[in-house]
Image: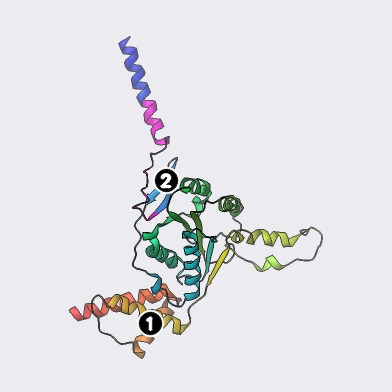
């Protein structure tokens, strides 16, 4: 009898070893009193919040040349945190112009007042109903943030996401807002063919306008649209000066913004094909670091 029991237990252990990878992983409980930001993660059959540390080195005052967009999103966030009506926001436009930085700067500004940030990848937005449900009733105010949200031509899952967003956003509790960034105003590529063949013909679509509206309906889920445009040269150089002062101040770097330095900054941008805030900050880091290195040498 003991041999049968031992054989049974051994067999049971083998079965459990095979089943263990398929079992849900216990999720770590997040203490939102101390955790300011988290990302929504999937691991095996489990989904959970993973606390993350976001750098607070970018403040709202660092975002130059996007004053109107910054002020609008800041007002919308304050309305939200004070319990007043507020809109889900879509920040769209040229890359590197401060869309994501504004959202993270808002967290740095208002985390002490209970603002929290949850980053969600596009492929995980299908979990939005579960995310929203888990946050309902908590004392903090949560911005669910989807960075670089867009779809390529031919991708059909935007319709699924549209339905998810429609249901989740309409029923979102008062302490949850969705902010998203994208390089595209309507999150989908707009093609010349969308505006062709508007005349009814053999084999043509009976209501072509409805096909176009279906493409832009996803972005309509956001009540607040903020547009970001490429920097002018003067705007770019002003941002370069700001970041040189920012990175040079701790080391008490003495410098002047000469014509030669401006030309160097312009050449840096031309070599990258970008003239934006990210490029300006990268040039400032390179230039300040080189000056300090030469001083030490």
111 or 186, nearer to the observer = 111
Quadrant (top left/top right/bottom left/bottom right) for the C terminus? bottom left
Residue 259 in percent (x, y) is at 36, 90
Work out whether mark 2 precedes mark 1 in sequence or the reverse, and give the earlier one.
2
Q: Which is more toward the observer, 22 or 170?
A: 170
Looking at the rendered structure, the number of numbered marks drawn on it comes to: 2
Q: Identify the mark at residue 164; answer none if there is no mark.
A: none
Disc 2/disc 1 C-alpha distance (Å): 44 Å
Place of residue 288 in the rendered image (x, y in percent of width and height, measured from the top left): 29, 78
Span colored in magenta: 14-37
Looking at the picture, how far across and down is residue 53, in whole percent? 34, 57
Name the residue tied to disc 2. 48
- The answer to if 18 sits in the magenta stretch is yes
Residue 185: x and y in percent read 57, 67
Q: What is the residue that sits farthest to the top in this orientation? A: 1
Q: Residues within 10 Å of mark 2 (few under 14, many from 20)?
A: some
In what quadrant of the picture does the N terminus appear? top left
Locate residue 294 relative to residue 204 in the image: left or right: left
| Position of residue 47 in the picture relative to residue 292 (left or right) | right
Residue at horizontal 38 percent and vertical 65 percent from the top: 109
In this view, the residue in front, 282 or 169, is 169
Q: What label does residue 265 carry, if any?
A: 1
Q: Residues within 10 Å of mark 1 (few under 14, many from 20)?
A: many
* Disc 1, SS: helix
Q: What colour scheme does the image use?
A: rainbow
**Outermost residue to the left:** 297
In the rendered view, does 252 fall on the left or right side of 109?
A: left
Residue positioned most to the bottom: 259
Q: Give residue 57's quadrant in the image.
A: bottom left
Q: Secondary structure at mark 2?
A: strand
């Amino acid at each position: 009898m003991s041999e049968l029991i031992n054989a049974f237990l051994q067999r049971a252990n083998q079965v459990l070893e095979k089943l263990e990878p398929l079992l849900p992983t216990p999720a770590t409980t997040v203490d939102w009193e101390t955790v300011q930001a988290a990302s929504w993660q999937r691991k095996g059959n489990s989904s959970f919040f993973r606390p993350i540390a976001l750098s607070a080195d970018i403040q709202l005052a660092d975002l130059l040349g996007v004053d109107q967009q910054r002020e609008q999103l800041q007002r919308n966030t304050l309305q939200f945190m004070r319990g007043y009506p507020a809109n889900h926001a879509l920040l769209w436009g040229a890359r590197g112009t401060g869309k994501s930085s504004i959202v993270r700067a808002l967290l740095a500004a208002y985390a002490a007042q209970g603002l929290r940030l949850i980053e969600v990848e596009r492929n995980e937005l299908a979990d939005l109903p579960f995310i929203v449900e888990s946050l309902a009733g908590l004392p903090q105010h949560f911005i669910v943030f989807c960075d670089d949200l867009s779809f390529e031509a031919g991708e059909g899952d935007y319709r699924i996401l549209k339905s998810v967003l429609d249901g989740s956003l309409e029923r979102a509790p008062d302490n949850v807002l969705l902010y998203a960034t994208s390089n595209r105003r309507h999150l989908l590529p707009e093609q010349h063919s969308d505006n062709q063949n508007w005349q009814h013909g053999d084999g043509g679509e009976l209501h072509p306008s409805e096909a176009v509206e279906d493409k832009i309906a996803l972005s309509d889920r956001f009540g607040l649209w903020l547009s970001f445009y490429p920097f002018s040269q003067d705007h770019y150089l002003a941002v370069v000066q700001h970041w040189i002062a920012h990175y040079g101040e701790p080391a008490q770097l003495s410098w002047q913004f000469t014509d030669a330095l401006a030309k160097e900054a312009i050449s840096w941008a031309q070599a990258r094909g970008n003239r934006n805030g990210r490029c300006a900050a990268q040039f400032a880091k390179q230039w300040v670091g080189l000056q300090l290195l030469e001083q030490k040498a």
